[in-house]
Amino acid sequence: MSPNESAPWTSAGSGDLRTNLLGRVRRPGRYVGGEFNVRHKPAGEPLVVLSYPDVYEIGISNPALQILYSGINDDTPACAQRAYCPWPDMADLMRAEGVELWTLEDGRPVKDAAVWGFTLPHELSFTNVLEMLDLAGVPLHAAERGAEHPIVLGGGPATANPLPLATFFDAFFVGEVEGRLAEIVAAVSAASRWERLRRLTGVPGVWVPASSPRGRARRQVFTDFSSSPPVTRPLVPLLEAVHDRVALEIARGCGAGCRFCQAGMWYRPVRERPVGLLVEAVQEALRQTGCDEVSLLSLSSCDYSAIEELVWRVRALRPGLRVSLPSLRVDSAAVSLATLGDRQRGSVTLAPEAGTQRLRDAINKRVTEPLLLDAAAATFHAGFTGLKLYFMIGLPGECDEDVLAIAQAASAVRDLARATRGRARVSAAVSAFVPKAGTAFQRERFAGLEVLQARQRLLRGAWPRGVKLALHDARAAVVEARLAVGGREWSAVVEAAWRAGARFDSWREHFDLARWERAAASVGMNIHRAFEGDELECESVIDSLVSASYLRAEREHAVAGVLTDDCRHTCGSCGVCRAGVAMDLAGAEALR
Amino acid sequence: MTWIVLRFARGGRARYISHLDTARALQRTFARAGIPLAMSAGMRPKPRISLGLPLPVGVEGRDEVAAAEVTGDVTHPGELVERLREAAAEGLLPTAVELWPQRPRLDPVAARYECLTALDGTAAEAAVRAFGAAEEIFVERVSPKGRRMVDLKRLVTVDGARRAPEGWWMGFTVRHRADGAARPEEVVRWLLGGDAASPPAARIVRLGVEYTGVPVRPGSRESE
């Protein structure tokens, strides 16, 4: 490394052009890499480009990309490099100057990769995928790609329904890819594009829209999760990212069974890493990153079987080390918060999701008002100065009374905050319920824009003073709802919207519903058309492992207000656990 | 506790990060190297490390300075440099550690720059002469606080132009006064004849900054 390098990441030819662009955009550090722990593997073959379809600061914090980046570079002969979605100022300049998307590691054109993998986090990122393909000079449609183009491979939670993107991707990997990395790398090492695709088709979990239109790809579960160490040499950005801490995945999967939650179904069964493995990993990750905070990551960190022992042992590693538990379930948060002691600062997020007991029972959120207040009290006693509450509106069976109860719950928490910790901040984020594929509510009707906006007005009118209210954009939820359960025909809408200028749709300042309405109309569709209950095409191509009968039964339980127990305590027969796939709890080791 | 001055160079990819990002990256470099920094007192303790004059985004620095207080005694500054180098990010290169009896004062007095131009020798030397001959050179500065005119002649000396294999370099010194200083990109833009809407694409290198009490390190005089 030499500071005399003028632009070490640029390849010959276009280097000066890129340097020129970097001097004319906001935050040029987004486009040059150079993070701590970045891997350089010049002799690595084949070239795999990994992308997260959002701006660098969001993408660099994504744990899935960190896992793939470490796994491919450290454990396979392939070379993994990255590209994120350029912010519009850079994208416009790239088009004006004829510069194609490059990788952060050494500035190679992204289109030179053997395979270009996208982590697809949610539906509002879809237009960014098209934006990146276009900027890279890769044809948008898989059918139009030639021998010189990379295989475009999608993964991540949005592959629960990949159909609105089926036109643009050569293949999708469905589920957790860690256990299949070697097979995928071997498949894409073939010389010809056709052969790469043919071999990929044989990898379990891969769905190739063009060649297996009637096949069902089975979601893959990483069965060695518990015995494998988490990422201990993560990329640490030089730019300020959304998260600046070691994020260590302590468990995967959630047994709570919330009926709206896609992640809760998609990552089943629950698997936990043993305490000893995690403590060693924390020590190494702190050394490699220079961070002074550790986030113990999972869908529900407080449900980790040995959470008290883990927090205690991690804290003992270094005086002053901050430990955070990012996802707390209300019904067990109080215990976990007590575990953290009274040295905390910052804020805690709790998600009661609904305002009334009736609705919380319907969505299988085992939360009562006393539990919520206990958790809030524990938050303030533990020293936190802020508490954020998550709610949803537009849930199935919701009425005005349920919406007003959200304001009442916020008011009660505010009163408690004032009584126990005078200056604590209480805030609430209220999002719109969107039916997601693979959940018990996948066939529920989306509330629609008018209903959501009416309920937002109702909520604003009843909102207590002293509690900050953040309402998610109901207009964006309309698009999300259509794409979450839409079929292949929605590819045309995504493309028309992108051609009309849609990108960064999850950013309020960039989202434009009218653009999507016009795009849908231009291909004979209606973005506001209510979803008809039985049409769920993705079920014919994706096997999420959760049985249809379980999801049907859960939907009936929702209507009846019947709770389903956490599958850690009582098996709900969802169908996921089978030969080789089973729950694996850290506490069980201690019991044995 | 020991106060040190860390000298480092910023180049390559790292020249595209901001002053705050540079400070954060250095702080992380100490942590990765296992060199604990002393913490400030108060409710929110912060590591005692501060950088000198901010280096603008896109500008390389040959001899940048950070003042830091490390816990414990430092007997082998050279060893510290080695550990910091191993822990540093690409483009941030620790070059020297100097021991200081107290907290070093980092008030800038003057900063020397060079910029690589696409001009030929005749044009580069003509630009240097034109700067010298002018009585006043006002450029417009636009900031969130509004627009104002800055007289470069009052704040800048253009040192000359020199030829190198990669092109012509033009050197200049910015004086830092109580009422402000010129920005290097303003000087470069004037020298190259660009307008405010199109920032210069030339490479700009800061050779060193003279601070009150912390001189420029001998030897860091040229950009190549």
Image (cartoon, coloured by chain):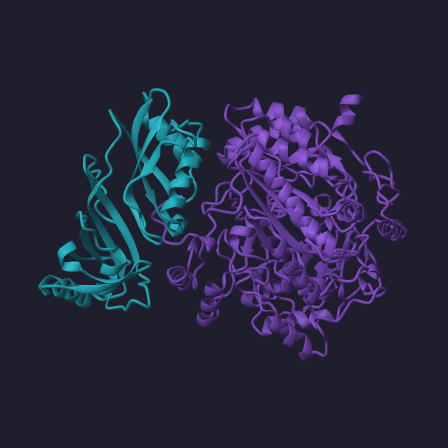
Chain colours: A purple, B cyan
Residue A570 percent coordinates (x, y): 86, 36
Tell whether A30 sits left or right of A127.
Answer: left
Please indicate whether residue B157 sits to the left or right of residue B186 in the image.
left
Residue A557 at x, y = what percent? 87, 49
Number of marks present in the image shown: 0
Can residue A168 be spotted in the picture? yes
Image side of residue B6 versus residue A125, left or right: left
Task: Using the image as rendered, state which of residue A90 and residue B79 is in the foreground.
Answer: A90
Q: Nearer the viewer, residue B24 or A168?
A: B24
**Residue A190 in picture, x, y percent from top left:** 68, 56
| Residue nearest the observer in this picture, A371 or B128 | A371
- Residue A424 location, x and y as percent? 53, 37
The residue sitting at 51% across, 60% down in the picture is: A86
Q: Nearer the viewer, residue A130 or A507?
A: A507
From this viewpoint, is residue A75 visible? no
Instruction: Name the image quarter holding the N terminus of chain B.
Output: top left
Quarter of the image for residue B209 reads top left
